[in-house]
């Protein structure tokens, strides 16, 4: 029988139009075969196959619709997911009855049709269809339909990956990443982990005043051992809501990795942590490019000079082109206002980038230097400083969440509490 993934009528087919900013968890390694009737739908499915969230799926597209699918599976096993495009109402139900006779157990079916009718939707559900999508479809519609098959409605704790990378070495991207992660954990009360990917020279352990005996190197060099329990043992607890997957920051071995070296680590972290902040080193390799493209949100940290502008533009354009169905990367300017240093004004930087920076962080050597040397965050050094507020705003923008801290009470609060206690 065709398996059935429960959907509510509110979701199909009269639900709100899909938003490209919805969080969609990546699909696992599955086989997907699509049988299309129109070139427009085939093009949308082809584009969906290039989306990062279907990067592990093996996608094959054929024309011919329902009839071609029935004929194909008379002599061949069915894949994990079948996508069927069909034109008419009777064709759908009759075709599904025939398909069920040749379909392997466990195969999930997504139907793309043009009839927007709840009665038809209920008939499809009764026959075991996993999802019904109204045509015309876009690439993100196909991505969402396939990925949602493997993400249960109650499993909303699937982690969101935020990648922070510097446009140039020495621009303070690690400092920004660590302080933003601190704000996400402390001010937004979101369980988070910082993964320091600079294995040779990472500073996350120093910034959080941690010296764990194990860290991310133990995982990346032992891929066969990576699972939830193993990763949990490697995490160093910084606060109630913040953990660290530290880099060894030693030079006793060479850290040359394949493009997919960190995939198992990221996949495991997604299953246990709502928010994962990647501190990506300033280098260009297969695995750094893969980590950035696969992230849910990206923050580029740049200083206000020409080399940073060029690099920021290059990174921004490449990632935007590689992730057409995601939010565009964000960027911030750091170390702004160094005395006697010629700088590109933020307005000119924004004009060249064709987008505004989400923050312009001023050059504060005394405060940042003290925090770094003491193993503290800026919020611990100066809780009310404007830079602390900037890190919180960046955290809110990247996570899409508002501040959850309790508002400060007035000077009458103690008196009110005493009066309540007496009652």
Image: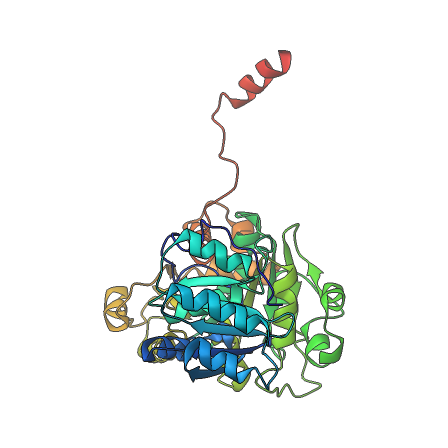
Position of 182 compared to 84: left or right?
right
Q: Position of residue 99 (x, y in %)?
A: 54, 73
User: Depth check: 234 or 100 in front?
Assistant: 100
Q: Is residue 69 above or below residue 371?
A: below
User: Depth check: 41 or 394 in front?
Assistant: 41
Q: Is residue 124 above or below residue 312?
A: above
The picture quadrant where one finds residue 321 is bottom left
Task: Residue 49: tell me if it is visible.
Answer: no
Q: Is residue 220 above or below residue 374?
A: below
Position of 220 compared to 357: left or right?
right
Position of 218 compared to 122: left or right?
right
At x 52%, y 84%, the residue is 72
Q: Quadrant of the C terminus?
A: top right
At x 33%, y 80%, the residue is 39
Q: Position of residue 256 (x, y in %)?
A: 62, 88
Q: Position of residue 21 (x, y in %)?
A: 40, 60
The picture quadrant where one finds residue 322 is bottom left
- The number of numbered badges drawn on the structure is 0
Residue that extends furthest to the top in the rendered view of this protein: 423
User: Depth check: 205 or 26 in front?
Assistant: 26
Colour mapping = rainbow
At x 56%, y 62%, the residue is 128
User: Depth check: 50 or 94 in front?
Assistant: 94
Q: Position of residue 189 (x, y in %)?
A: 57, 47
């Amino acid at each position: 029988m065709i398996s059935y993934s429960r959907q509510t009528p509110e979701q199909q087919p009269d639900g709100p139009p899909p938003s490209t900013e919805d969080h969609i968890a990546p699909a696992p390694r599955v086989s997907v075969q699509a049988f299309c009737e129109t070139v427009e739908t085939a093009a949308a499915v082809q584009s969906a196959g290039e989306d990062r969230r279907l990067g592990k799926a093996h996608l094959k597209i054929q024309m011919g619709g329902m009839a071609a699918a029935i004929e194909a599976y008379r002599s061949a096993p069915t894949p994990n997911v079948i996508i069927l495009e069909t034109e008419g109402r009777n064709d759908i139900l009759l075709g599904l009855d025939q398909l069920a006779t040749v379909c392997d157990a466990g195969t999930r079916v997504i139907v793309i049709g043009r009839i927007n009718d709840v009665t038809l939707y209920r008939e499809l559900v009764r026959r075991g269809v996993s999802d019904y999508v109204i045509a015309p479809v876009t690439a993100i519609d196909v991505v969402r339909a396939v990925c949602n098959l493997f993400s249960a409605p109650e499993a909303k704790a699937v982690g969101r990956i935020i990648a922070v990378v510097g446009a140039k070495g020495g621009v303070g991207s690690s400092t920004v990443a660590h302080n933003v992660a601190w704000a996400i954990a402390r001010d937004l009360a979101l369980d988070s982990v910082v993964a320091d990917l600079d294995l040779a020279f990472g500073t996350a352990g120093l910034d959080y005043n941690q010296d764990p005996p194990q860290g991310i190197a133990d995982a990346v060099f032992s891929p066969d051992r990576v699972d939830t329990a193993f990763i949990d043992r490697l995490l160093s607890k910084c606060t109630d809501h913040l953990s660290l997957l530290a880099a060894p920051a030693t030079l006793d071995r060479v850290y040359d990795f394949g493009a997919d070296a960190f995939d198992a680590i990221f996949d495991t972290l997604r299953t246990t942590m709502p928010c994962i902040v990647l501190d990506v080193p300033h280098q260009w390799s297969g695995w750094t490019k893969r980590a950035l493209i696969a992230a849910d949100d990206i923050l580029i940290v740049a200083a206000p000079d020409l080399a940073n502008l060029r690099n920021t533009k290059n990174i921004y354009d490449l990632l935007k082109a590689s992730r057409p169905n995601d939010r565009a990367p964000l960027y911030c300017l750091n170390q702004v206002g160094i005395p006697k240093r010629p700088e590109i004004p933020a307005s000119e930087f924004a004009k060249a980038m064709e987008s505004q920076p989400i923050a312009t962080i001023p050059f504060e050597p005394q405060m940042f230097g003290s925090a770094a040397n003491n193993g503290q965050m800026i919020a611990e050094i100066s809780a009310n400083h404007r830079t602390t507020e900037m890190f919180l705003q960046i955290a809110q923008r990247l996570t899409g969440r508002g501040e959850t801290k309790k508002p400060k009470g007035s000077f009458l609060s103690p008196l009110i509490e005493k009066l309540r206690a007496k009652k």
